[in-house]
Amino acid sequence: MYLIGTSSHPRKFAGDAQLPVFPRNIFPLSSDKRYDTVRKRCAQVKKHLDDAGAGKIEQLLLDIARVHHWTGLYAPGHPILAGQIDALRASLSGEAHRDPSGMLLLGIARDRVLFRDRFFGGDDPLVSNFTKVLYRRHVATLGIAEDVTAGELAVFFRRLHDLWAGKTDDSLEEFLLREGIRGIRISTVNYKEVLSRGIFATEASPRTEPRQEARGDAPGREFAPPFSEEAIRWRGLAVLVELLLSEKRDPEFLDLLAALEEAIPRLIDERDFELLDRVLSSFLHASESGTPARRAAASDALRSVDFLRIVDAILASPGTLEGEKGGAELLSKHGALAAEALLLKLQVEEGSGRRKILLSLVLRLGEKAVPSILSRIEGQRWFFLRNLCFLLGEIGAPAGIPALVGMLSAKEPKVRREAIQALGKIRMPDPDAIVALGRMLLHQPFFSSSREDPVLIAAAIALSRIGGTEAIAFLHIGKSSKKKAVREQCEALLRTRGTE
């Protein structure tokens, strides 16, 4: 029941890199001339693979490994997964059709795949993960028939993931038989022998030498690595990130992008900031390189991310602010998008402790947050305006000077004082800022209140920090102020500068 049959077609006799010398009793040869003909045909096949087919086979194996990987990330019947399996089935069927036997044969090594006389995929983690599952089930040869169905591939890949996760330890051969899967065949018989003899059986004959496992590979322990569902999912998404960054084909790139977008809400809810950071960083990288279509798609994906939801998750676990790979580090990479969410939250936040956290997160963004800050200057409540002035001063962005000068006429003294201090922190000798601060210092209304003293003193300190001839001149004039506190402050500042 398991015998596929034999084939005398010479393509079946390509062995390893040095053309194999097969025992004469294996082949029904009638003469040395026919034997030589077979060897010549082997050489032709080898050259054909070297010259034309290697790249195609390498891509096909990578597609197999990708679909195997995606099967662990999506539920059966998911549209993205179904589309990938359909495309893979067509490719596999086409490759199998080119062989007279109607069967694509692949040798399974520990971390590589052998096709005819060449190894593929040894340096690709996806291919390695795929082969390891089969290798540990003692599978030496994998055959995929021309008439394989998408359903058979889906069931097969799902079973491999169950084996890898330790959900089952059933015989893979018995599973294929029980499910009636005839488009996929496996064997413990060495691939080269299967290829050269033109047979495919699930049981090794007395003359075959099934692959020997390394010592210590105890069945039942090696086949079920202690990976939790969470660890497998994390590893899967991490690999998807690497695939996104290396994918050369636009359709596959868009599928990978969609798959990662789908995972983002769950990562946020679970506060997995490390993996979320890797995902969003891959979007950011893709939005800055590649074809215009890719850049646009990646930019749209970034803009669709709910950064406000990320901010809420960070506020719910403030300890992540301390870690290098925490939420704060994540936000610092996304400039305006993060600033918009943080300022929106700051605008409505009433808790002083949470406001301090939000302010520290905005400050980590630096000048990337300035455009968002400036867009919110008008029509805000006084305590939010005071926060904006504080941010502009701490960031030290010259672009904020005009807005801060405008704040000097605010009704609330606390806002005016914060704007003055911010101008002093920026220390830019802007003429408009110096004149506005000087007028504020020298303003002496007929009815004056001591509540204004802190504002005037702050103006004097800001002028001293800015420095320059005009700013220092205002301090000299300030020594004649009617307010004792202002006079004393100006005199002290001038003494410190040595210009009294």
Image (cartoon, rainbow, N blue to C red):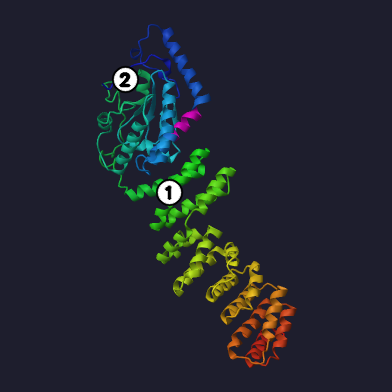
| Residue that protrudes farthest toward the front in the picture | 379
Q: What segment is highlighted magenta in the picture?
A: 54-62
Residue 181 position in % (x across, y down): 30, 28
Residue nearest the viewer, comparing 406 with 332? 406
Q: Residue at x 36, y 39 (%)?
A: 77
Q: Are marks 2 and 1 in contact (CB under 8 Å)?
A: no
**In the rendered image, which residue does mark 1 sit on?**
262
The total number of labels drawn is 2
Q: The N terminus lies in which quarter of the figure?
A: top left
Residue 61 highlighted magenta (yes or no) = yes
State the image quarter where residue 321 is shown: bottom left
Residue 25 position in % (x across, y down): 33, 13
Q: Amino acid at mark 2?
A: Ile
Q: CA distance from mark 2 to mark 1?
A: 43 Å
Residue 469 position in % (x across, y down): 75, 79
Q: Amino acid at mark 1?
A: Glu
The answer to whether residue 85 is above or below residue 465 is: above
**In the rendered image, which residue does mark 2 sit on?**
4
Q: Which element is circle 1 on?
A: helix
Residue 232 highlighted magenta (yes or no) = no
The answer to whether residue 380 is above or below residue 173 is: below
Residue nearest the viewer, comparing 444 with 109? 444
* Mark 1 crowdedness (10 Å alpha carbons): few <14, some 14-19, many ≥20: few
State the image quarter where residue 480 is shown: bottom right
Q: Which element is circle 2 on?
A: loop
Residue 223 position in % (x across, y down): 29, 40
Q: The C terminus lies in which quarter of the figure?
A: bottom right
The answer to whether residue 400 is above or below residue 486 is: above
